[in-house]
Image: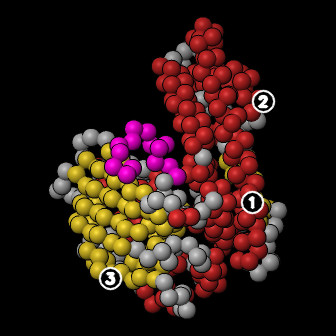
Amino acid sequence: MFVTRLGLHNYRNLERQQLFLSDGMNIFAGRNAQGKTNLLESIYLCASGRAKRARHDRELVRFGEREAYVQLHVSPAGGRYPTQIDIHLRDDRPKGIAINGLAIHKLAELFGKLLCVIFTPEDLLLIKEGPAERRRFIDMEMCQVSRVYVYHLQTFHHVLKQRNSLLKSLKGDRSAARSLRDTMSVWDNQLAEHGAKIYRERVNFVEGLHNAASGIHSDLTGGRETLSITYKPNILPEDFPRKLEQSLERDIALGSTSVGIHKDDLYFAVNGVDARVYGSQGQQRTASLAAKLAQIEMVTKLAGQRPVLLLDDVLSELDEHRQTCLMRSISGIQTVITCTGVEDVVRKISGATNYNIYNIEHGAVTQ
């Protein structure tokens, strides 16, 4: 699939833009703080319903304005009808989302309309970051390709929030544990049910991710190093109900649920050694790059069509060899890339004919 048109009005510092994108490479060049990342973020917003760098929707509205609009047209593979995604952002109310002119009421209805993989310099720190970032790394791509997964994940976190709310209201009251076991068992059974399904889906996804990433990593390192990625559960599904019951008194003392799939992690090993603890910075970045590129392969395999790739000034963080491997890996995929110096990017895609170059300055885009 590929994005054909992007319209923006008062989105961050982008006042009013109407862009027609190539189905190949789209290069947005400009100095820092001109709006390049904002443009990429608006595309990601249409895929996920969330902005990668904002906690509140009002942060996405241009300073001094009260509302903003994003409109995106995407053409799926196989000659299917194009889809129009509209997002209306307001500083005082929840955002409105419409698909082909019809308002949607659940975020899950948006997933899969635009398949998207975003790659930022922060993603090269995937291995160094905490478990929450690695779980998010899995969940974002899985939500795009499986509405069933979205349902189980949303339900799990809703139940978890309810359980934690009750635990916080009783925090420190250990005597309450005995009287609340029956009430807690209702939440616990739901957490166990949905947690087990999420666990199985994640394990299968990570197995495929490992298979794809290990080959990419071998290419990046010239065959000198091996990479393995495995899923690291906090507890196994069959132990979930028992562990939740056993931890109830401790959970009341803490005011939160201490066991479950919300504590799971990914384990990266380079040459059989824990990359997070013992890997060099270069090894960690190479492994993160391989995992990110493997995401593209996994989304393509599971969804049956290639995602749109968003590269936010990533080339400047990579050496010459890794740049070459990255550009070779994304051949044939619509790519929107930002950079400060356009010459290096053009040199990397020399021989390609299907690309556009844009300049961004003070929130204004010119081709």
**Position of residue 216 in the picture relative to residue 91 (left or right):** right
Tag of residue 238: 2
Q: To which residue does mark 1 refer?
A: 210
Earlier in the chain: of badge 3 and badge 1, it is: 1
Provide residue 92's location: percent of width, then percent of height.
Answer: 24, 42
Provide residue 252's location: percent of width, then percent of height.
Answer: 57, 21
User: What span is colored magenta in the figure?
Assistant: 99-112
Q: Residues within 10 Å of mark 1 (few under 14, many from 20)?
A: many
Residue 122 seen by the camera: no
The answer to which image quadrant residue 65 occupies is: bottom left
**Position of residue 210 in the picture relative to residue 45 (left or right):** right
Provide residue 238's location: percent of width, then percent of height.
Answer: 78, 30
Residue contact between numbered discs 3 and 2, judged by CB atoms under 8 Å: no
Amino acid, disc 1: His
Q: Is residue 168 magenta?
A: no
User: Residue at the spot x=72%, y=72% of the render?
Assistant: 216
Q: To which residue does mark 3 refer?
A: 367
